[in-house]
Amino acid sequence: MAYSNKVVDHYENPRNVGGFDKTDDGVGTGLVGAPACGDVMKLQIKVSPEGIIEDAKFKTFGCGSAIASSSLVTEWVKGKSLDEAQGIKNTQIAEHLALPPVKIHCSVLAEDAIKAAINDYRQKAASRPASEAKTEEVV
Amino acid sequence: MNDFAGFATKHTRAANSAVPIYLDYQATTPTDPRVVEAMLPYFTEKFGNPHSRNHRFGWDAEEGVAQARHQVASIIGANEKEIIFTSGATESNNLAIKGVARFYKDKKRHIITCVTEHKCVLDSARHLELEGFRVTYLPVQKNGLIDLDLLRSSIADDTVLVSIMAVNNEIGVIQPLAEIGRICREKKVFFHTDGAQAVGKIPLDVEAMQIDLMSISGHKIYGPKGIGALFVRRRPRVRLEAIISGGGQERGMRSGTLPTPLCVGLGEACRIAQEEMGAEAERLHALRTRFLDKITEQLPEVYVNGDLQNRIPGNLNLSFAYVEGEGLMMGIKDLAVSSGSACTSASLEPSYVLRALGVEEELAHTSLRIGMGRFTTEAEVDYAVDRIVGEVRRLRSMSPLWEMAQEGIDIKSIKWAAH
């Protein structure tokens, strides 16, 4: 299968590989996929008190398209508010990377990973005492 | 031969050239230059129809076919009258399985095969199920070999055929052919074996192994694509119903004008393989040992799929835990290998052969098949090892599963959402 130049670029020079301390209050972690299916993505976001995603990191087990999809979304979410990041659609990812139909599930997984990370962050914020949960009100 | 000087070196390129290193010899092999040379006259001056009985052109072609038939028979210890030329092992397998089952259908309605067979065998068997036959698909043990006791107990009064491959195409394991042959002969059941991956690589003798039918492929043994053969035993006689109707060539079992150049190519490929098999097996075994040792010295958590002892020397099938196979292949584009990962097939299912061994799905996704052959060199092996080690390390460093494993988290304890 021939990969698009963008997929190859992200595969060979993945952006933002790594992770944050997942116990940190400002960090949201999404872990999606399953080893048995051949794809697992871990995507983490670091959110500012103003509710802006300041930084993002990923690690992915999967094919080149899965690695590229997760690498791409770490770039896209940076600087976005949680609501904006929540709006990223798998079709945008697939279009940007020119994924063939058989690889669309990689972009779906990347979208799921963002949503899971945001969700994790929001749940953490909600479970904190009200006085500390200011960041959430801003959003 | 001089016209082809340098031909072989094209496959054994230097590590810095742009052509990938070919390590997929179970998929296909380059045609040996000696084979091409033997074929060439049969395209031009000896172009006759080998079935033309009344002129020189026909006789020349027939002579070429006869010699080829002899060479094919010789490598498996058969008589040349027992060799039917076909278009390849897929056709041979179809003809053997459907042909035998249909011929004896009035009395026998059961066949036995194995879950790790090539798709053309499994699909032929499925086809027969639709025609009302019963099929037993034997499981394999963890090492990829069938259980002989289970085979014996699966044979029923109306079993007509046992079809068990000689060598598996993905994991290279060699089934116990002589033992299977003994059981089948004792139970008076025909024994067919798909020898596509075995002929020319391991010694085969249809008499000693009591094999009744054997499928042979040209392009797996440095011969041309589009040609194969089926050995059909004459004593005790095996009968089969032809699939292709026509002029009654090949003793009525396979009509159609024989492709003389291809037949000659298959014959020459068998001759060379028979002559060089011993030394070549030793050379490949040393290369494989070197490959595996170098990999396992440098990388933890690499697993060999399938039995390492009962295996053709040129095959390795390795799982690199926590690194997805297709992702790995993308990083080693200068190596032509094959993966058991889901992503290389349209089905998105990992290899059914590895699954049949009981390899867990997550490990099946991380497998590579490395096939070494006649033109593989030690320098290529060393280069390939370096590339694989480097890429596995890089991908593990960005694998969330590797990270969890290093943190001591049991991946199986996590509730994964299947997608």
Image (cartoon, grey):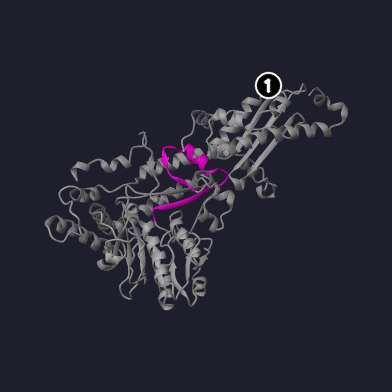
Which residue is identified by label 1? A79
Q: Tell whether position B335 is magenta.
A: yes
Task: List the single residue furthest toward the front.
Answer: B246
Q: Nearer the viewer, residue B101 or B162?
A: B101
Residue type, mark 1 in image: Gly
Tell me which chain the residue with mark 1 is part of: A
| Viewer can see residue B385 | yes
Residue name at image x 31 percent, y 62 percent: B254
Q: Tell whether position B83 is magenta.
A: no
Q: Is residue B351 above or below residue B113?
A: above
Percent coordinates x, y for residue B154 in the rendering: 51, 72
Residue name at image x 30 percent, y 56 percent: B279
Percent coordinates x, y for residue A127 in the rendering: 83, 34
Left or right: residue B192 versus residue B234 is right
Q: Is residue B228 above or below residue B135?
A: above
| Viewer can see residue A21 | no
